[in-house]
Amino acid sequence: PASVVPLAPEDPLFGLMAAYRADDFKEKVDLGIGAYRDDDAKPWVLPVVKRAQEILRNDPALNHEYLPIAGLAPFTSAAARLILGSDSPALKEGRTTSIQTISGTGAVHLGGLFLSKFYPRPASQPVYFSNPTWANHNQIFSNVHLPIKTYPYFSPSTRGLDFDGMISALESAPEGSIILLHACAHNPTGVDPTREQWKEIAKVVRARNHFPFFDCAYQGFASGDLGNDAWAVRYFISEGFELCIAQSFAKNFGLYGQRAGCFHFVTSPSADARETVKRIASQLAILQRSEISNPPAYGARIASLILNDEKLFAEWEDNLRTMSGRIIDMRRALRGKLEEMGTPGSWKHITEQIGMFSFTGLSEKQVAKIREDAHVYMTKNGRISMAGLNTHNIDYFAKAVDKVVRE
Ligand code: LMR
């Protein structure tokens, strides 16, 4: 029977990472995977994370027992406060339930699995994604047999948001559709709606009785301010929506391989909201138990220590500003250099887009060429991880872009 298994293609993003590692060209540049790098292109363990690790190392009570199925309670409750705001009406009214997951991917998956079982909809009704979206969204939702459609999002001509296209697609989607939204720092485009646009989006979602599913992988990376970056989610909640949130701590704590994340379900205000979330929590626990039994402890313990301690939290905010600030510097520098060289085209979008990524507008052909000629690695849709740029390679990269654009 093994002979019936067809060969699957390599994951494009992890394939790119492997190709970069195998390249021995000295000036190679990695702008592929969305992981923060310091000015020497090295992974950065956040100083506040090192401090938390030290505390854990010296804790004599620490052991390697299983966590509960729903995860580490001080972590999940702090994670909920972080995204919803500690004064959230949903928290005060007990309308939320939170479960620790295998980072953001696990949270999206658990949410997708839960909705595929319990969200009342015709089997053929699609879930709506932005076009484009994080590539993994497609396979995660396909795996739980939810059909997928897209709504317009990115406008190639303005390299900004195709707001009208998005709104009219949401208006014409079947009533009660699940709509996947990026909470902030949209991956892969770096283009977010403005607050006014979010309000319009919320209006349509309400009018069509859609269900918002927020994916939040970059809180703290878009504006450098945790509250600002949670604005859209908090706005929807203040409007009384029932929704869910997949939350990753990979990027904002630099805990990529530790897989710390959380899934939150928030119900609308109602007399039996507490009962409702209790039922939802019980079903999530059943799903979790059958899939991973219980989540991994170490990353959650680190995040929990930081989230629950005022001093560590303040230090974390400072570390976040270091990361987002360096990325903003690189955006300015890249745009400046391209404009200085008179590289054909407009490069405003480099500084207008936010978060970890920039959607450069380079074509698939140009991406292949720049990799071949200059050993610069980026995803074939022209996305670059801004964190891969630094003061040592930015000239080299800008020149490589200039060359490929003129060819
Ligand atoms: C990315 O898009 O580069 C990151 O979210 C990493 C991943 O898992 O795809």
Image (cartoon, grey):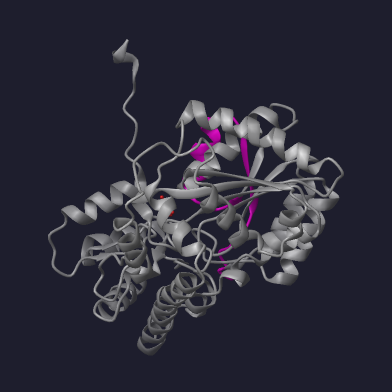
Q: Residue furthest top?
A: 1
Q: Is 146 contained in the magenta span?
A: yes
Q: Is residue 3 above or below residue 7?
A: above
* Residue 82 % position (x, y): 59, 62
Residue sitting nearer the eye, 34 or 55 = 55
Q: Is residue 143 above or below residue 243?
A: above
Q: Look at the image and give the residue range highlighted in magenta.
A: 130-159
* Residue 376 % position (x, y): 27, 64
* Residue 301 % position (x, y): 42, 53
Q: Residue furthest bottom?
A: 340
- Residue 144 seen from this side: no
Horizontally, residue 242 falls left or right of residue 141, namely right
* Residue 178 % position (x, y): 69, 42
> Which quarter of the rendering shows the N terminus?
top left
Query: Dividing the picture into quarters, in which one does residue 154 lie?
Result: bottom right
Residue sitting nearer the eye, 47 or 150 = 47
Query: Dividing the picture into quarters, in which one does residue 362 lie?
Result: bottom left
Callout count: 0
- Residue 250 seen from this side: yes
Q: Is residue 308 above or below residue 328?
A: above
Q: Is 391 contained in the magenta span?
A: no
> Which quarter of the rendering shows the C terminus?
bottom left
Residue sitting nearer the eye, 243 or 70 = 70
Question: What residue is rendered at 37% in x and 63% in y?
Answer: 52
Question: What residue is rendered at 46% in x and 77% in y?
Answer: 345
